[in-house]
């Protein structure tokens, strides 16, 4: 039995200590917005925030998470999808299949917490999650838009 | 043919579906067209939305919400939104009040396939549906207008409809108020339905936002992999690493005692599965099962032995498909200048982000399945065939896919496996999820091939003869042997055809010989976004580049001189040349390449701007892609598909290859099967040049020009052609 603080709620979970946090979140807690994509911390589909830092939950064992650690999943990011990153994602029409987007959004939110006005180079470095549909160009645009960088708005206008 | 274990299953599956469907639905068979009048007749059933069903495609709620029915699968390609736009356009409803409802395959079956085919591949989702879905929308509008005319006792011709409101003079009524009366109107005769001129489109043809974005932003979307059912168990599976090898024995002593494990079992003759309370328990226990397979001769196969086999095919006497005019061999032999090159491309996996999975519940006289599928009817057929439950008692629940790219079409191998597992647990839903490693090791890969190209140029540098000889694995041989007629498999010549309309070669060469020679292996192959246009475009377009350079001519001008008989190809090439600034100066160290090709009924062309540094490191800075897909239903979503095709195509160009060793795939996760990340994404500009005189595909056509445009730019940068993919194995300087 372990105690986890997920999205502001403390929950008791039953799992072996070596169970990856991803599978605790998906199968014990029942929050399925966090996705399994590779299991080896390569793709980032499983990205969550732990104490504000973006982490790949597929490669963090339950035993490494302390009861006081604050875990936030995509479901806990905002009520009504009102986070500026979610709104930017909608405005730019980023998702295609959508499967990787929970992780992409969590990575973008963490980036903007550290750098409120990221450059393209900052985005290159921080946004390393895999998207097979190839939404990378729109992800870049949406991060700029969420940051209030004006060039994103220009691009959006030009495209339509 | 004995090796083709999976191919056989696929054929059986199709046949079973035809036979069973005939029994179930009284005389209809797969592929049979349903008379259009049937599709317009309303079936009087309340939809899930509690709306009035006006006809099969349109149901309207009292609050004016228009529920548009969608038969095709949505895997990110945007077909759902595009189809809804086409129906809404003819319906003249308020786009802000449109919702969609997916049709289940059993409902389609019970309605004698009134919603048409459901398979979503070959970039056919919109182009094949467009006529009947637009007529569905138009018929609903006509019925709504007639109902209002009857109510107001005025001639229907005096009424108009716009934004879901019917108007006659000062009188107005909304669709929601008249829908119940409209549902009782006799549907119009299909020949009286006149579709709108695209020039007057207000909803279609516009860059509408996708309708399915909201729950992709907050984790609420339930993919099949996320399904939760009461009492559900979870299964992990490991199939024979050497494709098709049968299990000799397995030791479950350790795994059976591990936490949560319910059963360790053989699945068919080749795989072992563990069923447990959670998937993590199942996967962990599966790793503790010791399995012995009879791997046989196939365990000696490697990329090196496959290459030898393909090379042998390049110079063998026979062919398995050809196109010719004039005498290419003689023309080349007598030419002033000869050009020759041999290219190769590897096997590639699809690597959908959502791995293969299927949840199956079998009860007495009922079978249910939750699965991401590009072909709901094939899933239904697989469920029925494997479970033995008649089609009419089977149900496949729709879930949008976490990527498809051709992997989740006809084969349905994961459904067959999930049924085999669920048989051991009656009345209990069992969810089978493949690990990423399993997904990489058991794909139906994009086929590998090699291609020897030879050309002759005359004194003026004009192309007088071209000989193309492609040696590689056949998709039809694995999945659809009926597609091979008299030993000829023309599908492998995709993009090189003489016939117009689908995948026509855009060049006229006075002496031309194109040959395909089939060299199959035990590695399963299947359609992969763009299918054979991918490698065929690399071979043709990179070689045309070599010819242009040998002739001392500009790459664009050399192509133009061969394209006089192909004005549509040429127009797209010209569009990309203009928007891609062909011939204009570039920053120091940046070089440009160009390519054009045709597939899926659409014309594509691309320019790429790249630099290669002194160490041979490549950067792709900018790509411009032009597309004529005939009708552009949603320019915003077309741009998204073009951008996506660049990422998928560039990943293949830079990194994609299956490493086959000892008969198996050895690079089974993203640490060894690299995928391009955001930092490597070039700036992509999409130029849509629709001519509105045909309907072409969108999801696949542009991918094939990505690699050759980049490779031709590298050629410009380094002065050396690239003959082999992926680039990670090639020393550029």
Image: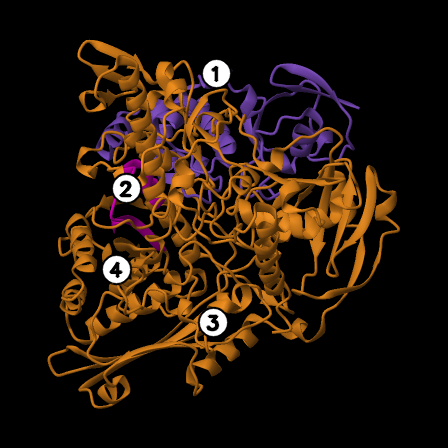
Chain colours: A purple, B orange
Q: Inspect this view and state whether residue B689 appears.
A: no
The residue singled out by tag 2 in the image is: B191
Are the residues tagged 3 and 4 within 8 Å (C-beta)? Answer: no
- The quadrant in which the N terminus of chain B is found is bottom right
Q: Can you say whether B116 is above or below B551 in the image?
A: above
Q: What whole-number distance in Å separates the C-alpha atoms at marks 3 and 4?
A: 28 Å
Chain to which the residue tagged by mark 2 belongs: B
Chain to which the residue tagged by mark 4 belongs: B
Local packing at callout 4 (Cα closer than 10 Å; few below 14, some 14-19, many 20+) is many
- Secondary-structure class at tag 2: helix
Q: What's the magenta region?
A: B618-641
Local packing at callout 3 (Cα closer than 10 Å; few below 14, some 14-19, many 20+) is some
Mark 3 or 4: in front is: 3
The residue singled out by tag 4 in the image is: B596
Q: Is residue B528 left or right of residue A37?
A: left
Mark closer to the chain start, 2 or 4: 2
The residue singled out by tag 3 in the image is: B484
Does the stretch in magenta take in B495? no
């Amino acid at each position: 039995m372990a105690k986890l603080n997920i999205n502001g709620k403390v929950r008791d979970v039953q799992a072996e200590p070596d169970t990856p946090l991803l599978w605790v979140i998906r199968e014990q807690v029942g929050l399925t917005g966090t996705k399994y994509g590779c299991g080896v911390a390569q793709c980032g589909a499983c990205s969550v925030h732990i104490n504000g830092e973006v982490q790949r939950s597929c490669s963090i064992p339950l035993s490494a998470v302390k009861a006081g650690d604050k875990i936030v999943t995509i479901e806990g990011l905002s009520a009504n999808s009102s986070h500026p990153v979610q709104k930017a994602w909608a405005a730019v029409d980023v998702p295609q299949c959508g499967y990787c987007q929970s992780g992409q959004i969590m990575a973008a939110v963490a980036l903007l917490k550290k750098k409120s006005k990221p450059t393209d180079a900052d985005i290159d470095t921080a946004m390393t999650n895999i998207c097979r549909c190839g939404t990378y160009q729109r992800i870049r645009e949406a991060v700029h838009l969420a940051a209030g960088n004006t060039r994103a708005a220009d691009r959006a206008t030009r495209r339509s | 043919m004995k090796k083709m274990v999976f191919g056989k299953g696929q054929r059986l599956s199709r046949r079973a579906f035809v036979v069973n469907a005939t029994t179930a639905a009284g005389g209809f068979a797969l592929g049979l067209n349903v008379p259009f009048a049937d599709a317009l007749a309303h079936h009087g059933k309340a939809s899930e939305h509690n709306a009035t069903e006006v006809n099969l495609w349109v149901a309207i709620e009292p609050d004016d919400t228009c529920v548009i029915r969608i038969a095709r699968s949505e895997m990110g390609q945007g077909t759902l939104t595009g189809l809804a736009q086409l129906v809404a356009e003819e319906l003249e409803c308020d786009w802000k009040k449109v919702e969609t409802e997916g049709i289940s395959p059993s409902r389609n079956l019970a309605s004698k396939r009134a919603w048409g085919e459901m398979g979503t591949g070959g970039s056919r989702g919109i182009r094949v549906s467009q006529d009947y879905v637009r007529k569905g929308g138009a018929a609903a509008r006509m019925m709504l207008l007639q109902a209002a005319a009857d109510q107001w006792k005025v001639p229907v011709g005096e009424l108009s409809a716009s934004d879901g409101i019917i108007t006659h003079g000062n009188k107005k009524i909304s669709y929601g108020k008249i829908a119940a009366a409209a549902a009782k109107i006799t549907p119009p005769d299909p020949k009286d339905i006149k579709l709108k001129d695209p020039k007057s489109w207000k909803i279609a043809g516009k860059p509408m936002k996708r309708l399915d974005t909201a729950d992709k932003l907050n984790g609420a979307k339930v993919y099949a992999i996320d399904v939760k059912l009461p009492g559900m168990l979870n299964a992990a599976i490991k199939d024979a690493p050497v494709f098709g090898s049968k299990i000799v024995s397995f030791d479950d002593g350790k795994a059976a005692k591990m936490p949560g494990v319910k059963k360790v079992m053989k699945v068919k003759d080749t795989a072992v599965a563990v069923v447990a309370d959670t998937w993590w328990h199942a996967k962990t226990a599966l790793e503790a099962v010791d399995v012995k397979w009879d791997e046989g001769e196939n365990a000696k196969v490697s990329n090196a032995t496959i290459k030898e086999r393909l090379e042998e095919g390049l110079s063998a006497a026979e062919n398995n498909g050809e196109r010719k005019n004039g005498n290419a061999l003689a023309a080349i032999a007598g030419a002033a200048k000869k050009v020759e090159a041999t290219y190769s491309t590897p096997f590639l996996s699809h690597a959908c982000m959502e791995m293969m999975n299927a949840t199956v519940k079998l009860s007495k006289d009922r079978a249910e399945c939750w699965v991401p599928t590009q072909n709901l009817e094939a899933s239904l057929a697989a469920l029925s065939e494997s479970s033995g439950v008649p089609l009419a008692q089977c149900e496949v629940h729709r879930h949008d896919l976490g990527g498809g790219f051709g992997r989740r079409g006809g084969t349905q191998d994961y459904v067959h496996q999930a049924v085999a597992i669920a048989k051991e647990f009656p009345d209990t839903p069992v969810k089978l999820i493949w690990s990423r490693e399993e997904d990489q090791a058991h794909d139906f890969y994009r086929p590998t091939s090699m291609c020897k190209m030879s050309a002759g140029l005359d004194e003026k540098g004009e192309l007088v003869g071209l000989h193309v000889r492609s040696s590689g694995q056949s998709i039809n041989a694995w999945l659809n042997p009926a597609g091979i007629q008299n030993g000829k498999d023309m599908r492998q010549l995709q993009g090189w055809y003489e016939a117009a309309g689908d995948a026509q070669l855009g060049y006229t060469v006075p002496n031309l010989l194109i040959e395909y020679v089939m060299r199959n292996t035990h590695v399963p192959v299947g359609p992969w976004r763009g299918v054979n246009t991918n490698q065929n475009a690399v071979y043709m377009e990179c070689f045309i580049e070599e010819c242009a350079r040998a002739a001392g001519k500009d790459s664009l001008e050399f192509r133009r001189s061969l394209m006089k008989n192909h004005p549509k190809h040429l127009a797209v090439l010209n569009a990309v040349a203009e928007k891609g600034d062909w011939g204009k100066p570039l920053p120091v160290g940046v070089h440009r390449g160009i390519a054009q090709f045709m597939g899926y009924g659409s014309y594509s062309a691309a320019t790429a701007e790249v630099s290669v540094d002194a160490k041979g490191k490549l950067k792709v800075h900018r790509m411009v892609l032009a597309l004529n897909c005939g009708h552009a239903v949603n320019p915003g979503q077309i741009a998204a598909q073009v951008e996506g095709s660049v990422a998928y195509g560039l990943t293949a160009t830079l990194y994609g290859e299956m490493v086959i060793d000892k008969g198996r795939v050895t690079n089974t996760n993203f640490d060894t099967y690299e995928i391009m990340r955001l930092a490597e994404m070039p700036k992509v500009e999409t130029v849509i040049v629709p001519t509105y005189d045909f309907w072409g595909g969108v999801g696949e056509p542009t991918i094939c020009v990505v690699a050759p445009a980049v490779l031709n730019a590298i050629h410009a940068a380094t002065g050396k052609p690239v003959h082999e993919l992926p680039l990670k194995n090639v020393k550029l300087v």
